Amino acid sequence: MATRKAVFAPPAAAPAAPATTSTRKQWIKKTPVQVVLDQIAKQQEKVDDLRADLTREERGLAKLQKAKAVLEAD
């Protein structure tokens, strides 16, 4: 059996914009310290969101427990 090689034609070259007129920000390599600080900030934000969700859920639970107490009183 003969093996076939896939022949891919290179995509049509689009006119490339000069690098000086690019609207993208230049990539700046982060130091390991910056990476860890970013991870800490992201984790803190996640914890704050979870605390807010927990507070809302606790309020809902308190309302339901009050309703339960009223229903059991009858």
Image (tube, rainbow, N blue to C red):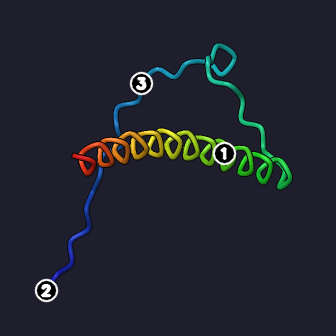
Q: CA distance from mark 3 to mark 1?
A: 38 Å
Residue ID at (17%, 81%): 2
Q: Is residue 59 left or right of residue 64?
A: right
Which residue is tagged 1? 42
Which residue is tagged 2? 1
Q: Amino acid at mark 3?
A: Ala
Residue ID at (55%, 39%): 52
Residue in front for this viewpoint, 33 or 42: 42
- At mark 3, the secondary structure is loop
Residue farthest to the top, as pictured: 21
- Which of discs 3 and 2 lies nearer the camera? The answer is 3
Q: CA distance from mark 1 to mark 2?
A: 55 Å
- Which of discs 1 and 2 lies nearer the camera? The answer is 1
- At mark 2, the secondary structure is loop
Q: Quadrant of the N terminus?
A: bottom left
Residue farthest to the bottom, as pictured: 1
Which residue is tagged 3? 14
- Which of discs 3 and 1 lies nearer the camera? The answer is 1
